Image (cartoon, rainbow, N blue to C red):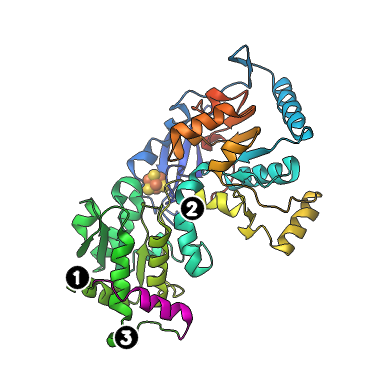
Amino acid sequence: MLAVPTTCPFCACGCGFYLLVENGQPVGVAPSETHPVSHGRLCARAWHAHQAVLWGERLRHPLIRRNGNLEPASWTSALNHLTHRLKDLIDSGKPVGMLGSARATNEENYLAGKLARAGLRPNNIDFSYRAVCRSLIQGIEDVTGAFIPSITLQEVESSETILLIEGDLAETHPQAASSIMRALEQGARLVTIGCRRTQMVRLSSLHLEAVPGDEGYVINGLLAALIRPERGDRRVATADTEEYASLIHNLETSEVTEELRRAAEWIARAEWAVPMPGLRDQCRGTAAAVATLAAITRHLHRPGSGILPLLARSNARGACEMGIAPDRLPGYEPLACGPTQDRLQNLWDRSLPASGGTDVETLLESVSGLIVLADDPPSILPGARRATAALQKIEFLAVLDVFATPTTEMAEVALPIASFAETEGTLG
Ligand code: SF4
């Protein structure tokens, strides 16, 4: 029996295990004792990962739609059909685009980006889950200038104070929940913000109630408790800038309760504190407030302190890093970054389009041709009906996926690809 090391594909915690393979078939899972994230611990989902390749209806052959039905075809005829249809659209000046995926590896996403920019030649490239996590990413970038987690799950375990925003981690990110529980065993304080009585809330030292979507209001209360001038706390970073003056001004009306004061005190005093934006990731203001809180309490760039945004999809960050966004190049460099543009043009031996593309929702409604790599907009985007209606109107739709999905059902060409258990690659 072979034991092949791999990374769990089910959430962004990135646990490691061995897939046990017999006669070319995955038959079981064994935890990796030395893996830096999971240390031999796995949640229930991962123990069944070997069965994941069988969970849905696998695409097994290239398919071409003929007389309304998807029919098996050879690789040569499917690829010829795909290239002729796309070339006709491009030659007639019609817009085309590409979707990458938060499920695909970094290497697959990089190639998708290269195909879009150097081959199809627009910057119409995105992935559906980015529409869900875009606000979280932008909110953190607004304050820190980058979207890079400043701590690891391992470091969470030695934190003194953890601030968790609206997350049922035991269900969605079990390894992160387990890291928090280890920190609690060593005396850490957990402050939760949200509206649901989750398992993490029951373990918290202090719970701050927030109505859904209004977590930012509570975080502003924490900020107000920290930076009001009368407090004069030297542990809080202050700056003689317009932004800082405007922050103080904006927080003047924020209500500061005794609970907020206590939580603010814990965060400010802790040597290692971790604000973890949770799963309500549509709110840019909340994410920016969390980042401001981390910056102002000097926890942003201190080893063992920082922000750990928990995304739901295993490789959303990797897809961003590979430039699967209409305004970003590989390395998450802005589209207008001259040196990166030059480097890519030399590497790919093509001039690259200069003007920005559109976000996934607009992209679906504006292109005439689309290639979709392991993405399924109707299952991911907030408006499933709108996504389906947009996909149905696209003149030529090609889908590359492991399983049949609502998107493959609308495709003119569907191509089977390898599952996580059958391919090599890295995750971001
Ligand atoms: S916590 Fe996430 S990455 Fe870890 S084993 Fe469970 S599903 Fe996989």
Figure check: 346 above or below 72: below
Real-space Cα distance between discs 2 and 3? 34 Å
Q: Mark 2 = which residue?
A: 134
Residue 423 visible in image: no
Work out how far the residue at label 1 is from the one at label 2, CA to CA, in angstroms. Answer: 31 Å
- The residue drawn where x is 34% and y is 46% is 172
Q: Residues within 10 Å of mark 2 (few under 14, many from 20)?
A: some
Give the foreground label among 1 and 3. 3
Image point 42% across, 81% down: which residue?
245
Q: How many marks?
A: 3
Instruction: Check if mark 1's residue and mark 2's residue have beta carbons within 8 Å.
Output: no
Spatial CA distance of label 1 from label 3 is 19 Å
Q: Nearer the viewer, residue 98 or 52?
A: 98
Residue 212 highlighted magenta (yes or no)? no
Callout 2 amino acid: Arg
Q: Which residues are magenta?
A: 240-255
Query: Which residue is label 3 attached to?
Result: 229
Considering the numbered disc 2 on the image, is that residue within a helix, a strand or a loop?
helix
Tell me if the residue at label 1 has its CB under 8 Å from ligand 1. Answer: no
Q: Residue at x 37, y 77 (%)?
A: 249
Disc 3 residue type (three-letter): Pro
Q: Secondary structure at mark 3?
A: helix
Residue 383 badge: none
Image coords of residue 237 (percent x, y)? 40, 82
Can you say whether 156 is above or below 402 in the image? below
Residue annotated with mark 1:
259
Residue behind label 3 places its C-beta within 8 angstroms of ligand 1: no
Along the viewing direction, whichever of 337 and 393 lies nearer the viewer: 393
Residue 6 in view: yes
Q: Earlier in the sequence, mark 2 or mark 3?
A: 2
Tag 1: amino acid:
Glu
